[in-house]
Amino acid sequence: MSQQHSAAPAPTPTTDAAVATVARRRDWWRDAVIYQVYPRSFADSNGDGMGDLEGIRARLPYLRDLGVDAVWLSPFYASPQADAGYDVADYRAVDPMFGTLLDADALIRDAHGLGLRIIVDLVPNHSSDQHEWFKRALAEGPGSPSRDRYHFRPGKGENGELPPNDWESIFGGPAWTRVTEPDGTPGEWYLHLFAPEQPDFNWEHPAVGDEFRSILRFWLDMGVDGFRIDVAHGMVKAEGLPDLGDHEQLKLLGNDVMPFFDQDGVHDIYRQWRLILDEYSGERIFVAEAWTPTVERTAHYVRPDELHQAFNFQYLGTHWDAEELRTVIDRTLVAMRPVGAPATWVLSNHDVTRHATRFANPPGLGTQIRLAGDRELGLRRARAATLLMLALPGSAYVYQGEELGLPDVVDLPDEVRQDPAYFRGAGQDGYRDGCRVPIPWTREGSSYGFGDGGSWLPQPEGWGELSVEAQTGTPGSTLELYRSALAVRRDQADLGAGDAVEWLPAPEGVLAFRRGEFVCVANTTGEPVTVPAYGRVLIANAEVAETGGEARVPADTTVWWTAG
């Protein structure tokens, strides 16, 4: 395990004054647009084919100019990379493939100097099997105190040859792996809800809570502005680890409260964490990745004394359909209002097919798709969906490359795939690599400007025409649409924070709502529709014709108006 936190010079803690440079207003997180960077695929500074912290640091001005408020970094901790860094061996060290702690310190400081906030990933449900705690647990054998920090259990059956219960891994197969004891005999089993290289912590053990409170303080002292909590609905398991009694468990995820997910005990952990966060100035925040059966249960995570935001996965999974969208929007706003938390809206991330490809295909195919679909249709809908998302009250998340209109790369050769779920039967579809292909910066050159030494996943031919260089200054490009929309969003007093919309009458298949003097109309149908002209057009993803007080809105188009 890397020991950067003891071997490298300690970075100087970020001062309150440095944090204050990004504190433009109170409650910034209620309407923030937060940009997700997947470090290995954003920018490569040293030509090894892998993105890194220095690459991100060099591109921070691009993100400032795009108009986002904060940058969320997926894990860059020391890790064997069995699950792209979500298997952490050392929570206080940077993996050498990404740089050093001093690189992280410089990135945070530069971001603050540009008016950007930095949110880092935290992975508290499980560690790497190369974490010192787990290696010690294996070495010390059954009954050792070290094993109590994880879920070790004797197996069932005459010789302990069967797993302790029937839980299944999210990545496929049983959620248990049997270890070979120090004397060479088959021994206990340990729990891993994800890959075998990711053993689950036992959060009933006080040392686990102590350690993570210390980890929080370490990164807060470094100056980070918040944490995105991976598997925030995990950590606490039902007492006794009871059998689930169903062998198609993955189909139940997101539909039922499971004995290993969304247990009420997680909320005690977050109340303790909130006390720590509130000790620090600058309005630091927590963001939950919480897959829950309903948006109402998601609201439990963002009560006033717990976390600040939670990803709205119900919205992400909604089809490009006016009726479905309105239902999810209404339920979300109603659920968040009693707890005083902002709604969040997201269309893509590192775990799902990019929405430009999802919307290019018929509904019902899920969030991991191997079909390219109708590229032109998908891009048109994706642009319209983005304008709808940015018009809703609350905070929005943008995944790197979606501002370029990137599709998923659906034809990666099997031999280059690296998603661990791809190699395990009956688990997730395992095609997350398609949304993780490094993004293009230039029309030409090695890896289209990603770096000087190729890219860890192959980029498609023609990627350069979608690059930042190709789209910058090009009227009608997706990049310029995002830049314009984010600028308008900042300038319009009626956009951003809030907890309600006023729905307006609209033709079937069309959403229309008012927020003060602002009106948004989204046509989700495949045909043009005629609606009232609500004032001055601020932005639209396609040409809108207005005559005699009426506007003709093209198919798959969202329009913003202002009466002011």
Image (spheres, grey):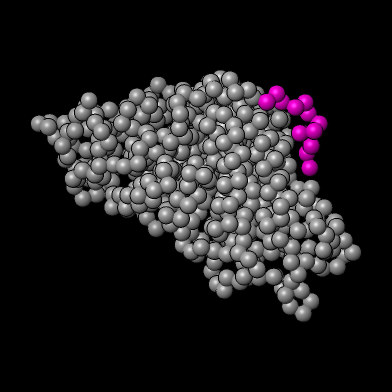
Q: Which of 431 and 495 is in front in this view?
A: 495
Res 187 visible: yes
Q: Main secondary structure of the magenta part?
A: loop
254 shown above or below 45: below
> Horizontally, is 275 left or right of 179 in the view?
left
> Horizontally, is 530 left or right of 366 in the view?
left
133 shown above or below 282: below
Q: What stretch is highlighted in magenta?
A: 1-13
Residue 271 pos. (x, y %)? 57, 47
Residue located farthest toward the right when viewing the structure as drawn: 183
Residue 339 pos. (x, y %)? 42, 47
Res 118 visible: no
Quarter of the view holding residue 378: top left
Residue 85 pos. (x, y %)? 66, 44
How many marks can you see?
0
At a point 41% along the width and 43% down the height, the residue shown is 340
Residue located farthest toward the bottom when viewing the structure as drawn: 158
Residue 111 pos. (x, y %)? 56, 24
Query: Was residue 116 drawn as part of the magenta stretch in this picture?
Result: no
At a point 57% along the width and 64% down the height, the residue shown is 259
Quarter of the view holding residue 500: top left
> Horizontally, is 364 left or right of 370 in the view?
left
